[in-house]
Amino acid sequence: MHKEKGVIGLKVDSLHEGTNEREFTCDAADFNDHKLIDAGFRGKVQIEVAAEKSETEITVSIRTSAEAELSCDICLAPLSKTLIGDYRIFYVYKDHAGSEFEDDDEYRLLERSAETIDITEDVRETLLLSIPMKVTCTDNPECRTFPGEKKEQTRDDGDRSTWQKSLEKLKNKYR
Ligand SMILES: [Zn+2]
């Protein structure tokens, strides 16, 4: 993220020993990432952060909650879902990290002089991780009528839509 106002950061000075809870709100569009928009994120993103500070490290737990416009994998019906994402990062103070320590996605080095921990990228990552692999209707009887194998679905696609159309007609008739 390049915009200053969108930066989500934890001020290290403001953290006391123990658990520190912080809340942030931003817009999905603030991240300037088309992947988020493509995934269906549109509006506000709620971010809850718990930073556990000790003498040696700061553990940052991120929870995101955001509404996404999705569509059912089976019947393509539009669905709106609140997606929850969780992510945890361990910031280890440099002077406490052994020489064996290797930085990676979850374990990172922190300078004693660090003023802010920028978690903007991690929040973006958490949102991407919260996108479900599978999306299906929860209360659409027409969708669950064909819960069969994927192969069968493709083969029956033509039949299904004809069948659905006649069902629609029937419904309208008896309304
Ligand atoms: Zn469906």
Image (tube, rainbow, N blue to C red):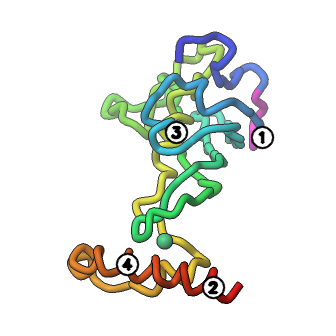
| Percent of width and height locating residue 21 | 77, 40
Q: Secondary structure at mark 2?
A: helix
Precedes in sequence: disc 2 or disc 4: 4
What is the quadrant of residue 61 in the picture?
Answer: top right
Q: Secondary structure at mark 4?
A: helix
Precedes in sequence: disc 3 or disc 4: 3
Residue in the image at 62% along x and 56% along y = 80
121 and 56: which is toward the camera: 121
Amino acid carrying label 2: it is: Lys
26 and 118: which is toward the camera: 26
Q: Which residue is the extreme one toward the front? A: 173
Kindly identify which residue carries mark 2: 173
37 and 77: which is toward the camera: 77
In the displayed structure, 132 sits above or below 22; it is: below
Amino acid carrying label 3: it is: Phe
Kindly identify which residue carries mark 4: 162
Which stretch appears magenta?
Answer: 15-19
Q: Tell me how far mark 3 sits from mark 1, CA to CA.
A: 16 Å
Kindly identify which residue carries mark 1: 21
Amino acid carrying label 1: it is: Glu
Q: Nearer the viewer, mark 3 or mark 1?
A: 1
Amino acid carrying label 4: it is: Thr
Q: Tell me how far mark 1 sits from mark 4, CA to CA.
A: 54 Å
| Percent of width and height locating residue 4 | 64, 10
Precedes in sequence: disc 3 or disc 2: 3
Q: Nearer the viewer, mark 2 or mark 4?
A: 2
Kindly identify which residue carries mark 3: 90
Residue in the image at 69% along x and 30% along y = 26
